């Protein structure tokens, strides 16, 4: 009986972790579509924009760059303004979303 309870708790824990990760990707996709994709596109840059695509970039790099733009330790008028509105969760979600895309 005790083994069944522990097994059930473990399975529920694993399922809830998967749901959180999936929700983060969906939240990142939503935020990227609303804020990032106008300049960076999703997989390729917008037609007339000279901005780099973000699909497939390293998660740690994207997270660090967004945090630096938000904190204004990395300078770009546009990015400082846009990233300034991002929470830590937003940054994690957007970085996870773009990092998970194939270029």
Image (cartoon, rainbow, N blue to C red):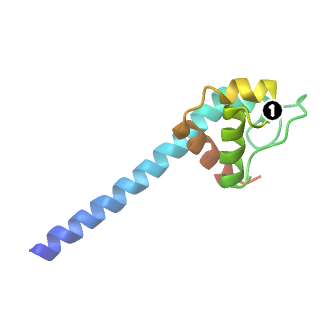
Q: Secondary structure at mark 1?
A: loop
* Horizontal arrangement in the rendering, residue 98 relative to residue 11 (left or right): right
Instruction: Give residue 38's position: percent from left, percent from top.
Output: 76, 27
Instruction: Give residue 36's position: percent from left, percent from top.
Output: 71, 32
Instruction: Give residue 97's position: percent from left, percent from top.
Output: 62, 46
Q: Count of labels shown?
A: 1
Q: Is residue 57 above or below residue 10?
A: above
Q: What residue is shown at x 91% (from left), y 28% (from top)? A: 48
Residue pointed to by mark 1: 75
Q: What residue is shown at x 15% (from left), y 68% (from top)? A: 5
**Which of 38/93 is in front?**
93
Quadrant where the image shows the N terminus:
bottom left
User: What residue occupies the far left of the structure in this picture?
Assistant: 1
How many residues crowd around disc 1 within 10 Å: few (fewer than 14), some, or many (20 or more)?
Answer: few
* Horizontal arrangement in the rendering, residue 5 relative to residue 71 (left or right): left
Instruction: Give residue 84's position: percent from left, percent from top.
Output: 65, 27
Q: What residue is shown at x 78% (from left), y 25% (from top)? A: 78
Quadrant in the rendering for residue 77: top right
User: What residue occupies the far front of the structure in this picture?
Assistant: 73
Q: What residue is shown at x 88% (from left), y 30% (from top)? A: 49
* Horizontal arrangement in the rendering, residue 12 relative to residue 103 (left or right): left
* Horizontal arrangement in the rendering, residue 38 relative to residue 30 (left or right): right
Q: Is residue 48 above or below residue 8?
A: above
């Amino acid at each position: 009986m005790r083994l069944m309870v522990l097994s059930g708790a473990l399975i529920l824990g694993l399922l809830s972790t998967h749901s959180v990760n999936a929700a983060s990707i969906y939240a990142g996709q939503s935020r990227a579509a609303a804020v990032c994709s106008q300049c960076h596109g999703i997989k390729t840059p917008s037609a007339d924009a000279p901005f780099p695509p973000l699909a497939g970039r390293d998660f740690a790099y994207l997270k660090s760059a967004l945090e630096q733009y938000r904190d204004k330790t990395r300078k770009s008028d546009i990015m400082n303004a846009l990233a300034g509105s991002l929470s830590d969760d937003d940054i994690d979600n957007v970085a996870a979303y773009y990092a998970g895309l194939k270029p």
